[in-house]
Image: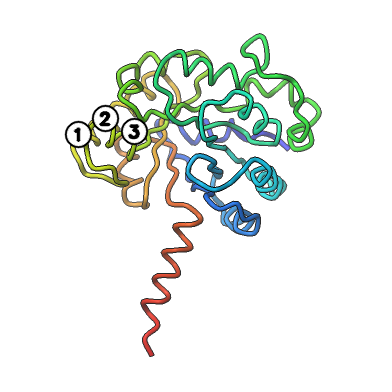
Amino acid sequence: MPMHTDTLKTLSGPSSRGIRTTWLHSASTLSGEMIARVGWDCLVADMQHSMTGFDEMVRLLQVTTNLGTTVLVRPPALDPALIGRLLDAGASGIICPMVSSVAEAELLVSACRYPPLGNRSIGPIRARLVFGDDYVAKANDGVLAIAMIETLGGLEQLGAIAQVPGIDGLFAGPSDIASSLGCAPRMDTDDPVVVEALGRIAKSAVESGIMAGVACEGAPYAQRMHEVGFRLFVTGSDVRLMTAASKALLAGFNP
């Protein structure tokens, strides 16, 4: 099947509605399959703040990509070897946490690109099954390398990171940004210091012609961030949606 990342790039354009997606925090393949059938533009499977290991991630990618769903993965850290394995397993891109410098952004790009654009080793065992025998020829253009900006270093080098060749987007992690700035770490924040930092991230990405992404708790805040300039919205998660629905059902059950 096609990698569909061109569709995501189109949806992230300045005049577009943006990319609607959610986190997969559960390793459950049943949960992943159910969420994949809802109709999100893509899914983001998480390894940083979930209990999902590599073998579980492979099974999750099998279930979701076999439904034709585009899946990005957030690894636990900037680990080129793991990033290569995740891409080989069928991930269409990487949202990498804690990118704090140009050197780290360059390392992310290198991990996602085959030579001469990077140092990714060739051996796409499952990716070739998912995306076709021509995968190696099209992967450098198709795979997304997105840098999460969450630290003071990342904020200080924002413009330079956005200009690194091969970086496809900047992604704001509001809670870690808040913590780095000495503010209360929480999602969907109204703290003016954090909101200003989020605005700078979006502006830098837009000016560099790359995606601007942000994690949100709910749709109203995502709409607000759309007005700021963001176009990639990871809103809620499978686990949070299940918890919220369970709480609502329990609260309404008072015979």
Residue depicted at x 50% and y 13%: 165
> Which quadrant holds residue 135?
top right
Q: Secondary structure at mark 1?
A: helix
Is residue 34 or residue 26 the one in the foreground? 26
Q: Earlier in the sequence, mark 1 or mark 3?
A: 1
Q: Which residue does the image show at 57% across and 35% down from the upper left?
A: 7
Query: Marks 2 and 1: CB-CB under 8 Å?
Result: yes
Residue denoted by label 2: 197
Nearer to us in this view, 249 or 37: 249
In what element is the residue under mark 2? helix
| Residue 190, horizontal then vertical, whole percent | 21, 44
The percent coordinates of residue 62 (x first, y second) are: 71, 46
Question: Disc 2 marks which amino acid?
Answer: Ala
- When the figure is inspected, residue 217 is found, relative to residue 110, above or below; the finding is below
Q: How many marks can you see?
A: 3
Residue lying farthest left? Answer: 192
- Label of residue 229 in the image: 3
Q: Which residue is mark 1?
A: 193
The answer to whether 14 appears left or right of 64 in the picture is: left
